Amino acid sequence: MDCLFCAIIDGDIPSRQVYADDTAVAFLDINPLHRGHTLVVPRLHVSDVLADPETLSLIAPAIQRTGRLLVERLGADGMNLLVNSGAVAGQEVFHLHVHLIPRYADNPGMRGLLQRSPAADLDEVQRQIVGS
Ligand code: AMP
């Protein structure tokens, strides 16, 4: 199977990982909307959130832990969680993933969600989150 996120989980394609457990891996989105934009991806290949009844709840602890990490390490003031299901909804990678999009007080509200913040150095953001 030719799946970008399976290849990232297997370590065949590099990513900036910020969290991992038995169920999921979390890494920085390569094209972030806001500083610290992260994808939480189940280790199990499931094409999208509607394709399987259990996977989203299986990775719920990983989503919560990663979200806490982003808030604590980056000083985010809030967060949008987003799951795109189907190409018409904007899904581009067909391996279920949850977008964790940290939000900051200087650009609040739903209207600010798609207004990208200035490009950040992803290596520096990863260091700030994982503390090395
Ligand atoms: P979606 O549109 O919901 O399928 O989101 C796919 C996300 O994957 C987009 O936000 C992309 O920027 C992100 N993405 C694509 N390739 C990579 C990659 N190699 N590493 C990290 N994020 C990626």
Image (tube, grey):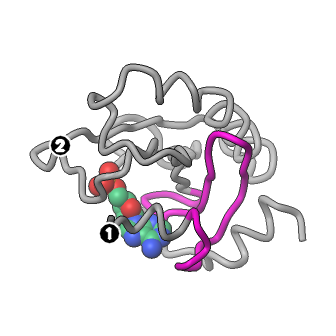
The x and y percentages for residue 13 are 53, 79
The single residue placed furthest to the right in the displayed view is 132
| Residue 25 is a magenta residue | yes
The residue positioned farthest toward the front in the image shown: 1
Q: Looking at the picture, which amino acid does disc 2 mark?
A: Gly
Residue at position x 57%, y 26% in the image: 58
Q: Nearer the viewer, mark 1 or mark 2?
A: 1
Q: Is residue 76 magenta?
A: no
Left or right of residue 91, residue 105 in this image: right
Q: Secondary structure at mark 2?
A: loop
**Is the residue marked 1 within 8 Å of ligand 1, measured from its CB?**
no
Identify the residue at image location x=20%, y=50%.
90
Residue drawn at (39%, 68%) of the image: 4
Task: Provide the major secondary structure of the magenta segment.
Answer: loop
Q: Earlier in the sequence, mark 1 or mark 2?
A: 1
Q: What is the magenta range?
A: 9-36
Q: Quadrant of residue 3?
A: bottom left
> In this rendering, does residue 105 appear at all?
yes
Q: Is residue 132 left or right of residue 103?
A: right
Q: Which of these two is toward me, 90 or 36?
A: 90
Describe the element under mark 1 as helix, strand or loop. Answer: loop
Where residue 75 appears, x then y in whole percent?
74, 47
Q: Establish if 126 lies above or below 94.
A: below
Position of residue 1 relative to residue 110, above or below, is below
Residue in view at x 58 percent, y 67 percent: 10
Q: Which residue is mark 2?
A: 86
Give the labeled residue for mark 1. Answer: 2
